Image: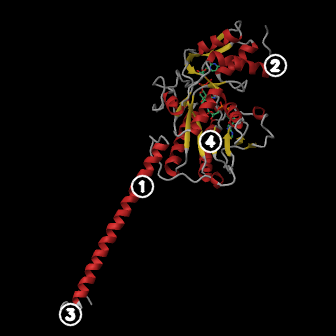
């Protein structure tokens, strides 16, 4: 036994055994420390790369994203890109579907509960082999195999989102959770259409993405604006916690063909009123401002955001700013010079000013709007006249 016979002939051998054991242990220690240090370096490098790759000023991801379907990397079978558009039967969603369907490598699945959207908006695609339409409410879980998710489902016009505020907040919170759960399961990239309403009644003007907003958390609009704020939070938490690839667009007022004629939003109201020769209803005081983006520009921005490397949030909107009185005067001049403009009561918490800073969209996406309000309004007029059956006279 070691220690008992220090003077025995074996003691030299024992000593050298002990020396060897100590040396071996030190070597093992050194090796393990090295492996640990390399591991830590690799993890911190990966985190840095993830943060840079996703424009992650808002915190690095803690895990690698889930793997996309094996079909993506299959050697002999080049799968199409399968894209889910929630709310695809609505105004912006249906224009987005048109653009996505132009690419023959895309298969598009639309889910919609038809609350404010309509099959009519998608009629040119129904029956197409690369297109599927599913009646589904996003507040219920959904299982489909897709590579990208454009998550638009949510009523957007104030009269519709205030109609059933509890349902609106469920759509924003539970609906977004369900879509994030789906993205996590199938490894899809997900884009949320958030809104300029996250800035509330802004105290900073114009608004860039660093502004945290001025929102009434218990007001009649909060089902929508707070709902979208929580949806943004969920997106970033899934990104940080589960490595989900996210994109967030903060959309400013968008207009164009296919808006519901009785949608209640200001551009559709004024155009329908001018065509029907009814007074244009400017809600008081009329000095409140908005910035209006034509829908084809918006769709272009959404696709660039999805395909790019930046998580957002990124403002998408047209920085041209108009008071509601100026908008009414433009509509009157372009569509019906005889029409009257009247003042009516406003609704609570109406934001007094809104105009996007789009520097980030320009720099990160190479995007800026191309269609001015005075060019977009006549295009919308044409569509509304067709649907109302009221042609332009001379
Ligand atoms: N149009 C704008 O000016 C604007 C501005 C900011 C943000 N956005 C956002 O863009 C998205 C689309 O807006 P839009 O103007 O096309 O509105 P929209 O009302 O025309 O479209 C919304 C679509 O979502 C569907 N939908 C609503 N709740 C649903 C649910 N629970 N389950 C499934 N489908 C549901 C509706 O039926 C409709 O087809 C919305 O998320 C909206 O918040 C729009
Ligand atoms: O007939 C009308 C309707 C509206 N308005 C005014 O027009 C302005 C714009 O109102 P809208 O209802 O079109 O839309 P808002 O800007 O209030 O909200 C929109 O913001 C961005 C998106 O998220 C949504 O599409 C929607 O919530 C408001 O100041 C409103 O008071 C009128 O003067 N007359």
Q: Report which residue position mark 1 lands on.
A: 42
Please tell me whether mark 1 sits on a helix, a strand or a loop.
helix
- From what the image shows, is residue 101 above or below residue 78? above
Label 4 CB sits under 8 Å from any ligand 1 atom: yes
For discs 4 and 2, the disc positioned in front in the rendered view: 2
Tell me what residue is drawn at x 64 percent, y 32 percent: 161
Position of residue 219 measured from the top left corner of the image (x, y, whole percent): 55, 31
Residue 31 placement, left or right of 271 = left
The answer to whether any part of residue 270 appears in the image is no
- Mark nearest the camera among 4 and 3 is 3
The answer, for residue 372, to whether it is visible in the render is: yes
Q: Look at 60% across and 25% down and name the residue there.
A: 253
Instruction: Classify residue 204 by image quadrant.
Output: top left
Sequence-wise, the earlier of marks 4 and 2 is 4
- Of callouts 3 and 1, the N-terminal one: 3
Mark 3 element type: loop
The residue nearer to you, when weighing 10 against 186, is 10
Q: Are marks 4 and 3 in contact (CB under 8 Å)?
A: no
Q: Tell me the quarter of the image containing the N terminus.
A: bottom left
> Residue 170: which disc?
4
- Asked if 217 appears above or below 77 in the picture, the reply is above
Which mark is in front, 3 or 2? 3
Query: Which residue occupies the extreme bottom position in the image?
Result: 8
State yes or no: discs 1 and 2 in contact (Cβ < 8 Å): no
Look at mark 3 in the image and give the residue it sits on.
Answer: 8
| Measured Cα–Cα span from mark 1 to mark 4 | 41 Å
* Separation (CA) of disc 3 from disc 1: 51 Å
Nearer-the-camera pick, 146 or 212: 146
Question: Is the residue under label 1 in contact with that under label 3 (CB below 8 Å)?
Answer: no
Q: Residue furthest front?
A: 76
């Amino acid at each position: 036994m070691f220690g008992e016979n220090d003077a025995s002939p074996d003691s030299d051998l024992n000593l050298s055994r002990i020396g060897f054991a100590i040396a071996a242990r030190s070597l093992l220690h050194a090796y393990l420390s090295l492996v640990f240090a390399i591991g830590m370096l690799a993890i911190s490098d990966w985190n840095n790369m993830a943060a840079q790759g996703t424009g992650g000023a808002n915190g690095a991801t803690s895990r690698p994203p889930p793997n996309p379907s094996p079909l993506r990397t299959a050697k002999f079978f080049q799968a199409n890109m399968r894209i889910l558009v929630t709310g695809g039967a609505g105004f912006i969603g249906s224009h987005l579907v048109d653009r996505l369907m132009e690419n023959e490598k895309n298969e598009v699945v639309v889910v919609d509960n038809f609350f404010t959207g309509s099959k009519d908006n998608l009629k040119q695609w129904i029956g197409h082999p690369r297109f599927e339409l599913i009646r589904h409410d996003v507040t219920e879980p959904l299982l489909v195999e897709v590579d990208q998710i454009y998550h638009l489902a949510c009523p957007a016009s104030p009269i519709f989102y205030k109609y059933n505020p509890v349902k609106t907040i469920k759509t924003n919170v539970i609906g977004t959770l369900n879509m994030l759960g789906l993205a996590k399961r199938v490894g899809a990239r997900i884009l949320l259409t958030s809104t300029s309403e996250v800035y509330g009644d802004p105290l900073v003007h114009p608004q860039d993405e660093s502004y945290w907003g001025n929102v009434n958390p218990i007001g009649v609009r909060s089902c929508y604006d707070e709902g979208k704020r929580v949806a943004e939070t969920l997106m970033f938490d899934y990104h940080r916690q589960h490595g989900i690839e996210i994109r967030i667009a903060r959309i400013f007022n968008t207009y164009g063909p296919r808006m519901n004629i009785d949608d209640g939003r200001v551009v559709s109201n004024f155009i329908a009123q001018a065509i029907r020769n009814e007074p244009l209803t400017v809600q008081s005081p009329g000095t409140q401002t908005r910035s209006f983006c034509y829908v084809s520009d918006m769709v272009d921005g959404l696709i660039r955001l999805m395909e790019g490397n930046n998580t957002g949030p990124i403002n998408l909107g047209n920085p041209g700013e108009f008071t509601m009185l100026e908008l009414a005067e433009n509509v009157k001049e372009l569509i019906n010079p005889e029409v009257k403009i009247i003042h009516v009561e406003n609704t609570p918490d109406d934001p007094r000013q809104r105009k996007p800073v789009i520097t980030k969209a320009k720099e990160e996406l190479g995007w800026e709007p191309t269609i001015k309000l005075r060019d977009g309004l006549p295009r919308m007029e044409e569509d509304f006249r067709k649907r109302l059956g009221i042609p332009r006279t001379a």
